[in-house]
Amino acid sequence: MRDYLLTLCVTAAVTYLLTGPVRKFAIATGAMPEIRARDVHREPTPRLGGIAMFFGLCAGLLVADHLQNLNSVFELSNEPRALLSGAALIWLIGVLDDKFELDALIKLGAQMISAGVMVIQGLTILWLPIPGVGTVALTRGQGTLLTVALVVLTINAVNFVDGLDGLAAGMVCIAAAAFFLYGYRLWYGYTIEAAAPATLFAAILMGMCLGFLPHNMHPARIFMGDSGSMLIGLILAASAISITGQVDPDALKIFEGSTRQATHAALPVFIPLVLPLTIIAIPMADLILAIVRRTWNGQSPFAADRGHLHHRLLEIGHSHSRAVLIMYFWSALIAFGTLAYSVHSASMWIVLVVVLLSAIGLVLLLLPRFSPRAPRWAESFVPPRYRRRKRAAVEPLAESATPAPASVEALEERIPVPAGVNGATAIGHRSRFTDRRKAGTSS
């Protein structure tokens, strides 16, 4: 565990430290597209955040290769090299798209080629565990098609959910945390060495997201772009493929006794087939709804619109930050609820807790204008919007509603001018004051 944490910290540190220079590079190269109709941000923001995330991936793999307990992953398996090859290809296509806006079909082809590169180097689904039957070996063609399909679906699901500041990075980080715990349990609890690569990939993915989030939280100073969203989607898919298709269920020695007993005992093996879908359940649902919605309206499935789940949260009255937190909540509930059930499937307390938290989430979802206030002793630890207003600061303004001209000039000198309509620009410093006007309006 210590080596995994060290790898995670190094990956996060490299990603965090490189994001600032990458932002300046994106501004210098003009990687700041104009605001589109579906965008939520109000002024051009640089992209190419995936550059810092890719170098964080490289640093994490390099550090893990020199650690004694993780070096065996590189000696006994070719999966880290396969991941790096596919990640480099999809990252390069993403960088070009962030700069030149590539066609959707070109990106789809690149995603399939990246998955094919990983399959050629051995990162593929070899078999599937089926309850009551055992391990079913797949042919090379079947394994390739299933691997490519899972990679493409995961990449596009993550790419679709990347619509609010910090949303994609946070949701993938939650998914990677759940997957790391599951992979570590198989590796350490069942002493299955084949689960070590997937556990390493999940730890590195967490580091990439945690290192990038401070720069990407609302208001974001840089976006990860397709170079980042497609990259983390591919790594998440590679982790699922590594555990699902490489770990031999027979190594657990659980297919014994009656069919019912074997099926119940094999639950920890079958969870990898479900967990990749549950941890991206919300992005996957958004992807499916988007395809159905656009096809129903006579549009291309690749056409952009403002009908995603995060857009709908904003439309019903939730703030930007609250919409992101709601998506975080549901992602964590689904991912960690599934993980807890895989560990203690016979406990009804897990089901009851999940149901209770789901009810709380629905209440918060239906109260978009509810603004909780922190107690006075905790006001110094929460953002200003959750603090109670002080009357002493408001009463002097009411008494001097019409200040003298001299005081007006002095007041204008003290109040800093907002850097832009969103309180920050892509090339300047943030202002402590935000202008709530919509972009393109004068009042």
Image (cartoon, grey):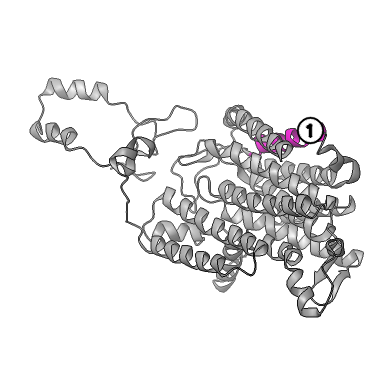
Residue occupying the point 57% across, 63% down: 286
110 is higher (above) or lower (below) than 142: above
Residue that label 1 marks: 62
Q: Magenta stretch mostly in which secondary structure?
A: helix
363 is higher (above) or lower (below) than 170: below
Whether residue 330 is visible here, answered yes or no, is yes
**Number of numbered tags placed on the structure image:** 1
Percent coordinates x, y for residue 434 in the rendering: 35, 37
**Left/right of residue 291 with respect to residue 81 in the rendered view:** left
345 is higher (above) or lower (below) than 368: below
Question: Is residue 376 or residue 125 the one in the foreground?
Answer: 376
Residue range highlighted in magenta = 50-66
Q: Quadrant of residue 53?
A: top right
Q: Quadrant of residue 379?
A: top left
- Secondary structure at numbered mark 1: helix
Residue occupying the point 19% across, 22% down: 409
